[in-house]
């Protein structure tokens, strides 16, 4: 399955994306609020993809590469997590982008494509998002997306994450909200980008 956007495509994550993603993941600030500290070499990225594909094979997750349409390069990743078809609920997370593509339409369009697939093709009723309670940029981005803040879960990711147990700020979008959020996101994505970026 592939999701075609205007500025990015979402492609099912595969090992063929490893080299691009290793380059995209080089800056340490990407990983400040993530469960890992980054990758010391291409083999680490390949292992990370293998782990994601194992979760996909078990039906727990669906990982994607975010591919820049202009260059054809993978510039980040995102995925469906905690998938519960019987409850018509899932989470969107593990989203990261190369710094050159942060604060561009890439993240908004990736979320839009995933939300459209979830609500319109899968009949999902609730999409959850969890971010580190200290990650102000991510929290602001979720509010701009149209997600509703539901509270902070203490020690939600109780495993050690970058040296501490994480409190998570919880957000969600539910099916009745999707039509108005979709309209607003589509209007936003029709605006031309402020600058043309390249990756390399």
Image (spheres, rainbow, N blue to C red):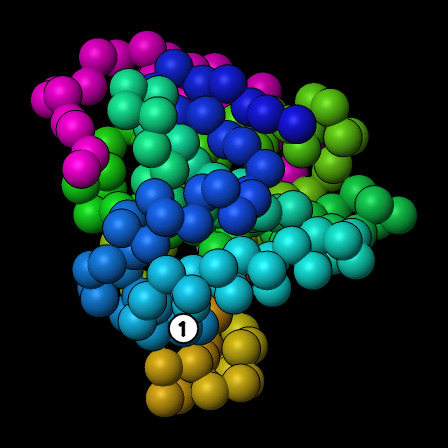
Q: Position of residue 86 (x, y in %)?
A: 88, 48
Identify the residue at image location x=42%, y=36%.
66
- Count of marks, rendered view: 1
State the extent of the magenta-drawn residues as a range. 172-200
Quadrant position of the N terminus in the picture: top right
Quadrant position of the C terminus in the picture: top left
Identify the residue at image location x=46%, y=87%.
160
77 is within the stretch colored magenta: no
Left or right, 30 with respect to 92, comes to left
Q: Is residue 132 among the parts visible in the rendering?
A: no
Q: Position of residue 148 (x, y in %)?
A: 49, 47
Left or right, 78 with respect to 121, comes to left
Q: Position of residue 122 (x, y in %)?
A: 76, 30
Which sits in the foreground, 179 or 191? Answer: 191
Which sits in the foreground, 144 or 4? Answer: 4
Residue 73 is drawn in which quadrant? Answer: top left
Q: Secondary structure at mark 1?
A: loop
Identify the residue at image location x=35%, y=25%.
72
Left or right, 120 with respect to 198, comes to right
Q: Which residue is mark 1?
A: 36
Which sits in the foreground, 169 or 54? Answer: 54
Q: Position of residue 127 (x, y in %)?
A: 63, 44
Q: Is residue 24 among the parts visible in the rendering?
A: yes
198 is within the stretch colored magenta: yes
Q: Residue furthest left?
A: 195
Residue 70 is drawn in which quadrant? Answer: top left
């Amino acid at each position: 399955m592939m999701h075609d956007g205007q500025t990015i495509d979402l492609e099912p994550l595969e090992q063929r994306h490893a080299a691009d993603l290793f380059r995209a993941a080089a800056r340490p600030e990407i990983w400040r609020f993530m469960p890992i500290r980054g990758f010391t070499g291409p083999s680490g990225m390949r292992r990370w993809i293998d782990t994601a594909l194992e979760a996909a094979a078990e039906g727990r997750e669906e990982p994607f590469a975010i591919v820049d349409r202009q260059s054809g390069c993978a510039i980040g990743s995102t995925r469906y997590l905690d998938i519960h078809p019987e409850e018509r609920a899932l989470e969107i997370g593990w989203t990261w982008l190369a710094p050159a593509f942060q604060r561009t339409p890439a993240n908004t369009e990736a979320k839009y494509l995933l939300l459209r697939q979830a609500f319109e093709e899968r009949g999902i009723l609730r999409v959850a998002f969890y971010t580190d309670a200290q990650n102000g940029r991510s929290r602001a981005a979720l509010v701009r997306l149209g997600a509703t803040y539901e509270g902070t879960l203490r020690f939600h990711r109780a495993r050690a994450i970058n040296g501490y147990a994480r409190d998570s700020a919880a957000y969600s979008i539910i099916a009745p909200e999707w039509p108005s959020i979709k309209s607003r996101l589509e209007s936003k994505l029709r605006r031309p980008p402020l600058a043309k970026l390249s990756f390399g």
